[in-house]
Structure formats: C-alpha cells, structure tokens
Image (cartoon, rainbow, N blue to C red):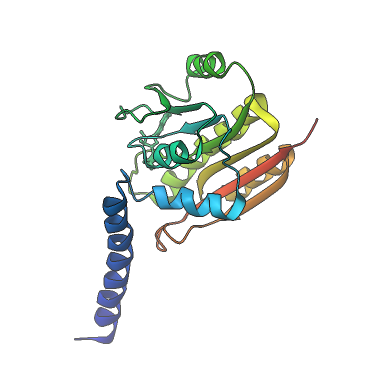
Amino acid sequence: MKKTKRAKKSRTWVIKQHRDQFFKKAKVLGYRSRASFKLIELNKKFSFIKKNSNLLDIGSTPGGWSQVASKIITNGKIIAVDILPMETIGNVNFLNSDFLDEKTHEKIRNIFNKKIDVIISDMAENTTGNKTVDSIRTNNLCSEVIKFSLKMLSINGSMVCKLFMGEDFLEVKNLAKKYFKNVEFFKPESSRNESKETYIFCSLLKTL
Ligand SMILES: C[S@@+](CC[C@H](N)C(=O)[O-])C[C@H]1O[C@@H](n2cnc3c(N)ncnc32)[C@H](O)[C@@H]1O
C-alpha cells in the first residue's frame, strides 16, 4: 500500500473511533445525541448553567442539550426551540418554530416573562457540501442569536453558540465583542477534529 493511502486510511480510522466513542457513550447514558457531551464540556469549562437558571435552547432537536440542561435545572424554566419536532423531555417547554421568525421571539418573551439567564444555541443550517457556504449560513444564525441576546439576556447572563471557523468568523467575533465584556472560544473534545465547528461563550453584557 502506498504511504499516502495508508496515512489516509489510518486518519479515517482515528476519526471513526472518535465518533464511535461518543456515540456509544450517548447510548449507554440515554442521551439522544452525542452533542450532549459538547454541552457537558462547555458547562464544565464555563459553569454557566445553575439549578435555578432560566434557559433557552435554540436548535434543540433531537434534544441532547435539553436533556443535559433538564438534569441540572431543577428550579428554573427551560424553553427549547426547533423547526423540527422534538420528543418531550420532562421539564422542557418545546416550541416547534423557526427561531428566525419574529413571532417565535414573541412566544419566548411571553413564556419567560422576564430576562433569560442562559441562552444556548447549537443551531446549524443543513449542509450544502460547500464548506464556505455552510459556514456563512451557520455563522449568520450565530449573529442572530447574539442580536436576540441583547434584547432578552439578563445583564449577568451567558450565551453559548455554535459557529464555524470560516472566512466570516472575525465578523461574528467582533459583533460579540461589541456587546459583551467577556468573549471566549472553546472547541469541546467531543466535537469532531475535522469539523470547523467551535463554540463562542459570551457573558457580561455591556451597558451601551
Ligand atoms: C446540530 S442540531 C442540534 C443538536 C442538539 N443540540 C442536540 O443536542 O440534540 C441543529 C438543529 O438546528 C435546527 N435549526 C436550524 N435552523 C433553525 C431555525 N431557523 N430555527 C430553529 N431551529 C433551527 C435544526 O433543525 C437542527 O435540529
């Protein structure tokens, strides 16, 4: 076997093992998706979900992140939003709606009836196969979450959102820095190495 072919095969094997490890772990622990581990790692690093948090999970289906949040939050409200349906989770109020629709914002406002402590978003557009296009589309969603946070997040609240290390990464970073005192980036171990996905963590809204 040629050297390049062998290297490619070995890389594929490593990627597959990495995926399988979290897939199996999710099954054993009863999580709906391997994504659960990303939120567990993010919360371990930044400690933003508390037992009395009011939390909004955007792009929640199939529910891995909501499951994690619902285990921690025993005395707060959780709202999950997705355009796709999601199976019920005990203390999670699910809205089957498009987050980009202003009417969805209205519904969220009415249910919480006050500012939100934690906004988490794992929203992603369907991939097109073109990495630049995919990154721009998902990073647009991230910008929308940042803008929504300005209106709905409590002053000491936290926001976590998926984004891609694409050409427009800096635009999103600058938007976040304009509005938050603290902006950090973290790629969980459970996020595939070969994926350009990372997460932005923002806290301490600036008073403009
Ligand atoms: C990677 S999945 C989320 C996985 C989830 N965090 C979990 O732990 O199971 C991304 C989700 O974003 C949703 N999504 C994409 N655009 C959306 C939009 N405009 N409004 C609401 N949800 C959206 C998709 O339907 C998809 O379910």
Task: Give the percent coordinates (x, y) of residue 192.
Answer: 39, 59
Ligand 1 quarter of the rendering: top left
Which residue is more in the foreground, 1 or 147? 147
At 31% from the left edge and 51% from the top edge, which residue is drawn? 29
At 44% from the left edge and 40% from the top edge, which residue is drawn? 71
Horizontally, residue 58 falls left or right of residue 26, namely right
At 49% from the left edge and 38% from the top edge, which residue is drawn? 121
Task: Give the percent coordinates (x, y) of residue 206.
Answer: 77, 36
Task: Give the percent coordinates (x, y) of residue 13.
Answer: 26, 72
Which residue is more in the foreground, 133 or 30? 30
Determine which quarter of the picture holds residue 185.
bottom right
Q: Can residue 166 be seen?
A: no
Task: Give the percent coordinates (x, y) of residue 42.
Answer: 53, 51
Q: Can residue 92 be seen?
A: yes
Determine which quarter of the picture holds residue 60.
top left
Q: Residue furthest right?
A: 208
At 58% from the left edge and 55% from the top edge, which residue is drawn? 45
Q: Residue furthest front?
A: 74
Image vertical order of residue 3 relative to residue 184, above or below: below
Tell me the quarter of the image containing the C terminus.
top right
Horizontally, residue 163 falls left or right of residue 34, namely right
Horizontally, residue 54 falls left or right of residue 190, namely right
Tell me the quarter of the image containing the N terminus.
bottom left
